[in-house]
Structure formats: C-alpha cells, structure tokens
Image (cartoon, rainbow, N blue to C red):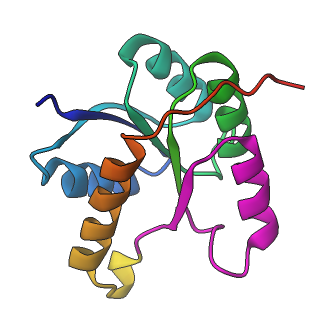
Amino acid sequence: MSKIKVLLVEDSPVAINIYEKMLNSSRHIEVVGKAFNGKEGLDLAAQLHPDVICTDLQMPEMDGLEFTKQIMARYPTPILVLSNTVQKSDADTIYEVMKAGVVDVMAKPQTALGGNSDSMQNELITKIRVLSTKKVSPIPLN
C-alpha cells in the first residue's frame, strides 16, 4: 500500500516541523512538500500531486482561503485547515473555508501551551487518513 502524500502549507517553520513530526510518525503518511505561503503551495501542489493538503489560513502573499480557492479550481485535492482561526467561536471563518472547498478544519495544536500532543497527533493522523479517501470536485473561481 502506498503512503498518503501530504503537502504542508504554513508560514510558521515551528508549526511545519511539529506537523511533519506528527505525520511522519505514521507509517501510512509521508510529508512530500512544505510551503511557507499559498503561492509556494500552489506551485508544489502542481508538481507533487499530494493526496491531502494541510494549510494555515493566515499567511503572507496568499492566505489560506485564497489558496484553497485556487487549489479547488486548478488541482482539486482534499484540504484540511489547521489554524488558530477555526475555534468553535469562528463560525464565519469556518463557513467561508468550507464553502471554498475545505473538507475539514482543526484548531492548531496548542502543544507549546501544554496541550496533549499525543491526542493531537492521533486526531491529525486520523483526519489525514480519512481525507485521503475523499474525492473532491473542482470549484470554478467566480
């Protein structure tokens, strides 16, 4: 069985390293690329054809919402948003990204604040494995 190819799009090098460690702990998942903004992410998605993309929302040059719209128009791929702006109180943000084509959202791991990193890791790996089985349709840019 081939590994699930994941592209990480996140402007924080610390967060990217945490996600990469979490995901690479699974024998089913391989991080195939890392981008530090949406523009880099678009280029890498075209080259790498990942099975799942994890993206932040707040990034320079091209934010996660615009990145999602571009991906869904050009290279439809299941997307998981990992962001501080998808807490339960951020219903408007969550609605906008879901409308743009995001399949699932997850609050950024708060491991630095003493959160349970094992449960975060398990949740992230489970979400990636589920998303890799989903087929998404193109969403034309308006």
Q: Position of residue 46 (x, y in %)?
A: 49, 13
**Which of the pair 4/10 is nearer the observer?**
4
Residue at the extreme bottom: 114
Location of residue 126 with respect to 23 vertically, above or below: below
Disc count in the image?
0
Magenta segment boundaries in residue numbering: 82-109
Q: Position of residue 65 (x, y in %)?
A: 71, 43
**Which of the pair 21/124 is nearer the observer?**
124
Location of residue 1 with respect to 81 vertically, above or below: above
The verdict on residue 88 being magenta is yes
Q: Position of residue 98 (x, y in %)?
A: 70, 52
As drawn, is 103 to the left or to the right of 62? left
Residue at the extreme right: 142
Q: Image quadrant of residue 117?
A: bottom left
**Residue 61 in view:** no
Residue at x 45% of width, y 40% of height:
134
**Residue 5 in view:** yes
The verdict on residue 128 being magenta is no
Q: Position of residue 18 (x, y in %)?
A: 29, 58
Location of residue 41 with respect to 109 vertically, above or below: above
Residue at x 16% of width, y 47% of height:
24
Residue at the extreme top: 47
Residue at x 66% of width, y 41% of height:
60
